[in-house]
Amino acid sequence: MKTINDAIHGQFRIDGVRKDLLKTPEMNKLSHIKQLGLAHLVFPGAHHTRFEHSLGVSHVAGMMADSMSLDDSEKDIVQVAAMLHDVGHGPYSHTLEHILHERGGMDHMSITEGIITGDYDVLREGELNSINDRKSIPEILEGHGIDPNEVASLIRGPDAGGSERNLMDWSEGRSDFVEQDNTLAHLVHGPVDCDQIDYLLRDSHFTGVNHGVIDYRRLIMCLERHGGDIAVEEGGIPALEGMLMARGLMYSAVYFHRVTRVTEIMLSRAVERSADQLPDSVDLQRRVDAEIWQALYGAGDYARDMIRRLKYRQLLKVCSSRRRQDLTDGQVELLAGLASDSEKRRLFEDEMALRAGLQPGYVALDVPNIKLLLAEPRMSQVDIRIIGDDGKTRWFKDHTPIADALKIRQVSQAAVYIMTLPGHEKKVSEIADRMVFS
């Protein structure tokens, strides 16, 4: 049995299958991947990693399982899936995921599923020589009587892409409508899950931004397994409202903070514009944060300059931005097209740089909300079941207008940012006005 001393949850113990998983290279690699990427350049305390987050998520999963009276087998599966839910993350997590995915890599959930089933190996060539008596994750799971495929099936959740669930035949007050049981999958990845509870608490603590402080114990206490899914007792609505509001506020204040976006764009452009001088995406995805810096430092003048600027916090500056309501339909169409076609966007950026007398790569266009397609499909998911004091089951939106408000709330302060080198802001802003905002 291992005793974990955690900054968020205090002391808790890990034993059995999770203790064995703790020894794997897949888990220990996460100690070298920061939870919030380059956010420490904005929030100095944000040096926490995917490793301690994964332990915290597993602990919270156990609390949720106990509150919902899951049996021992179900609790084990949920805690294992929670512990392993991030093992597919590559260096700098979501910051680089879209680029590596675009260039032939896999998204982190697909990699996670492959690791759990034994179809993907995180080790790079030669690394196995440094690991003694290695056991794969599926071997460990099967050794404890757990089906790896069952664990892998929980990683995405049954509707992680945001599609509507098939509950058209549900009528208000009906207590027993089950087409399939989504309870375990939604505990790991759903509108109210162990992942969100831990990352809100943990990210809030280490960034010093208090928006993520939530009444999670009360929320967990009010969870029920109902009709093949997670439901919240009516008495838990204030805690649920608090968590969903905290999620939106943390996206605005931390994850989509303007300067955080600048640092992410600088790193992603360094990778994107140096692809010919870097290892392939599959190799890069097997690395950790520090190894990406090492690779970029030797990948040409542009990548080296971006790494030095990040190292010494000599960042690009936002010279122009617009909120969604300030854009015409034509401008929205242009920006959406650029954001969804990286080659077209690079050519557009380079034309702006050329007109400003700058080298390619020193003007960047960022549409922050596109990031949500890969990073957080749950933002619009607020269709949560509430068990009323009258015994009837209704949707969360039927109890509070906050549900619909959260669906349309803009998570970024701006819909588009234009950034460039310090000292060139005025010139590039004028060019952006002509090329983008005219």
Image (tube, helix red, strand yellow):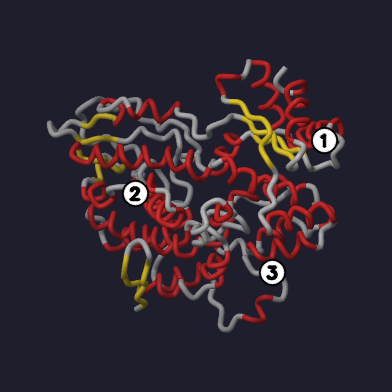
Write the residue at 70% across / 27% down: 337
Q: Could you tell whether 401 is left or right of 434 in the image? A: left
Nearer to me, 319 or 283: 319
Q: Earlier in the sequence, mark 2 or mark 3?
A: 3
Q: Residue furthest bottom?
A: 132
Q: Which mark is residue 353?
A: 1
- Which residue: 58% across, 46% down? 260
Q: Secondary structure at mark 1?
A: helix
From this viewpoint, which residue is outermost toward the front? 423
Vertical order, 106 against 159 (above or below):
below
Q: Amino acid at mark 1?
A: Ala
> Who's the residue at 25% across and 27% down the image?
399
Q: Position of residue 74 (x, y in %)?
A: 32, 58
Q: Amino acid at mark 3?
A: Arg
Tag 3 residue: 124
Contact? badges 1 and 2 (CB < 8 Å): no
- The answer to whether residue 98 is left or right of residue 4 is right
- The crowd level at tag 1 (other Cα within 10 Å; few <14, some 14-19, many 20+) is many
Sequence-first disc among 1 and 2: 2
Q: Position of residue 169 (x, y in %)?
A: 31, 26
Q: In the image, what residue type sits under mark 2? A: Val
Circles 2, 3 touching at the beta carbon (< 8 Å):
no
In the picture, the disc for residue 249 is: none
Quadrant housing the N terminus: bottom left
Q: Please give the label number shown on residue 213.
A: 2
How far apart in space, not on screen, are marks 3 and 1 (Cα)? 38 Å
Q: Quadrant of the C terminus?
A: top right
